């Protein structure tokens, strides 16, 4: 396998060299053959050989396994050293076009960053990350992806005894805002410059030709995060733990712990069991993303200018622009959800009115927008069925149709726009939990397989997966999700 290890050639204070802990009885649960093919990653021929590879028992030739060190703001509180406490980066797989893919094992045992943890993963969080990362990819949202799931044949102890598993994760890289915070907090400006130059070369090599590459990097990362969170919001996704150590410079979604897609629309929705005060609630995600970018900017100050005031002024100017970049992406995405190809003031006003009606009526976020295309002409019954009070939404429909007509958007064109960005099926939280329960309690992965097939074409009309459109019944609702650690 053509592995390279550029990160492990950085100075040794960037990581710990470590070999994954061998597991007793690895068994292949699932392998993402489509992803492997797109990467040109050569899979072993047998399930047993894949289990050995993706458990970490057999390492690919040429890899140089390391656990990365980083810091992070966790729920607003700075932790000066975190790091990969249950993950090992095998290296970078390089395909025939020269594209690099970080290959990381999660649940591969203790490292020096485990902080008294066991470094292992229960099966449930592995299944959740596999499903949700695939759902995000299918929705067209930048994300890390899962290449394989492997059972370990061993038990993991949390609140109860659970089956253990290892996830193989693929990412553009695992460079986080928290990686910069680690060296900045130690005033290690040499390492900070090495890391920043590495990040530019890895993700934004065109910046090396600019007059101010470090300011340009901050600008690029801010723009990537603004666009990413806008996309999350457009499909009702709640990350759950938007700590700086879960914020990538590549602009990919990473670390699917206590995350979920929202059912009833409410900006205050929280799923994380540890987010007691709603810091990472659905509606707070844009502000938190800007906060994380401000933390990133603070790390880069020594590189922006030798004069601290000048550096701060340059950084502040970029951070102040985050909100406008987010709004551009957010309103462009959201106005398409109601059939407008541009986001004029009247379109935005109509969008906000609909969201208020949805919040008041506790309407389902995904179903409401998907059904709207059926109301573009004179057949609103399906759409109206999602609302208890019909008068206010009926008035909205009249105003909405008038505005579509004013902007010259024909009904069939509006429906095409909406159906192209409003999914029919998402990985609803109760469905994910059903898949996890079947696997953990009965060793049944058929529920996982069917859910993965249901979300494979989220924007298509497929009657054989109609049941996956439906929100949970009251008895099926899952109000909290948990981190695998």
Image: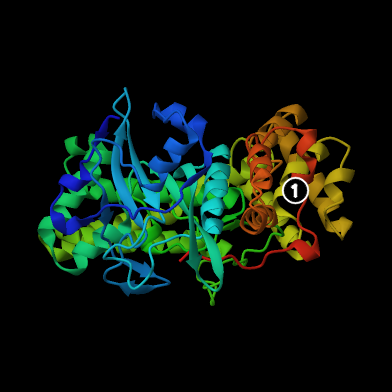
Image point (15%, 45%), residue name:
9
Work out which quarter of the rendered image holds the C terminus and state it. bottom left
Is residue 16 placed above or below 272 in the rendered structure? above
Q: Which residue is mark 1?
A: 367
Q: State the colouring used for the structure image.
A: rainbow
Q: Position of residue 68 (x, y in %)?
A: 27, 56
Residue lying furthest front: 24
Q: Classify mark 1: residues with Cα within 10 Å, few (<14), some (14-19) or many (20+).
A: many
- Side of 398 where 148 appears, left or right: left
- Side of 147 where 427 appears, left or right: right
- Side of 13 where 100 appears, left or right: right
Work out which quarter of the rendered image holds the N terminus and state it. top left
Quarter holding residue 73 = bottom left
Is residue 194 placed above or below 78 in the rendered structure? above
Quarter holding residue 420 = top right
Q: Position of residue 466 (x, y in %)?
A: 79, 41
The residue nearer to you, when weighing 200 against 301, is 200
Q: Is residue 312 visible?
A: no
Q: Position of residue 77 (x, y in %)?
A: 36, 75
- Side of 210 where 471 appears, left or right: right
Quarter holding residue 357 = bottom right
Q: Position of residue 266 (x, y in %)?
A: 67, 63
The residue nearer to you, when weighing 175 against 287, is 175
Image point (62%, 53%), residue name:
236
| Helix, strand or loop under label 1 | helix
The residue nearer to you, when weighing 482 against 226, is 482
Is residue 242 placed above or below 470 in the rendered structure? below
Q: Is residue 365 visible?
A: yes
- Give the total of numbered labels: 1
């Amino acid at each position: 396998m053509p592995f390279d290890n550029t990160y492990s050639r950085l100075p040794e204070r960037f990581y710990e060299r470590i070999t994954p802990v061998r597991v007793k009885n690895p068994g292949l649960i699932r392998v993402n053959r489509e992803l492997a093919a797109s990467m040109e990653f050569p899979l072993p021929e047998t399930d047993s050989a894949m289990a050995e590879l993706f458990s970490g028992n057999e390492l690919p030739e040429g890899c140089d396994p390391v656990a990365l060190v980083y810091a992070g703001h966790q729920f607003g509180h700075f932790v000066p050293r975190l790091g990969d406490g249950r993950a090992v980066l095998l290296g970078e797989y390089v395909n025939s076009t020269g594209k690099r893919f970080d290959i990381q094992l999660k649940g591969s045992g203790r490292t020096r960053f485990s902080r008294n943890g066991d470094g292992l993963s229960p099966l449930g969080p592995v299944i959740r990350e596999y499903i949700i990362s695939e759902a995000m990819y299918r929705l067209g949202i930048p994300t890390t992806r899962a290449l394989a799931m492997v059972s370990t044949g061993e038990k993991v102890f949390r609140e109860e005894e659970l089956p253990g598993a290892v996830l193989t994760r693929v990412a553009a890289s695992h460079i986080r805002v928290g990686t910069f915070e680690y060296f900045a907090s130690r005033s290690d400006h040499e390492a900070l410059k090495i890391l920043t130059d590495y990040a530019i070369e890895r993700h934004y090599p065109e910046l090396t030709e600019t007059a101010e590459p470090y300011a340009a990097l901050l600008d690029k990362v801010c723009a990537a995060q603004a666009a990413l969170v806008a996309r999350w919001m457009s499909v009702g996704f709640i990350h759950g733990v938007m700590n700086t150590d879960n914020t990538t410079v590549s602009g990919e979604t990473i670390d699917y712990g206590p995350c979920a897609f929202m059912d009833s629309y409410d900006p205050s929705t929280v799923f994380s069991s540890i987010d007691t005060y709603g810091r990472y609630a659905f509606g707070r995600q844009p502000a938190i993303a800007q906060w994380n970018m401000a933390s990133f900017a603070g790390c880069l100050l020594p590189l922006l200018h030798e004069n601290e005031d000048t550096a701060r002024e340059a950084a502040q100017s970029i951070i102040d622009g985050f909100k406008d970049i987010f709004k551009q992406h957010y309103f462009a995405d959201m106005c398409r959800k109601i059939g407008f190809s541009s986001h004029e003031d009247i379109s935005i006003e109509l969008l906000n009115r609909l969201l208020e009606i949805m919040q008041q009526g506790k309407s389902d976020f995904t179903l409401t927008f998907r059904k709207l295309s059926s109301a573009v002409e004179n057949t609103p019954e399906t759409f109206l069925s999602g609302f208890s009070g019909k008068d206010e939404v009926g008035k909205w429909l009249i105003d909405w149709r008038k505005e579509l007509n004013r902007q010259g958007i024909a009904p069939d064109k509006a429906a095409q726009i909406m159906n192209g960005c409003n999914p029919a099926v998402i990985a609803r939280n109760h469905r994910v939990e059903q898949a996890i329960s079947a696997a953990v309690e009965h060793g049944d992965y058929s529920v996982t397989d069917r859910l993965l097939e249901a979300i494979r074409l989220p924007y298509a009309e497929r009657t054989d997966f109609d049941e996956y459109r439906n929100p949970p019944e009251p008895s099926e609702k899952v109000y909290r999700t948990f981190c695998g650690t």
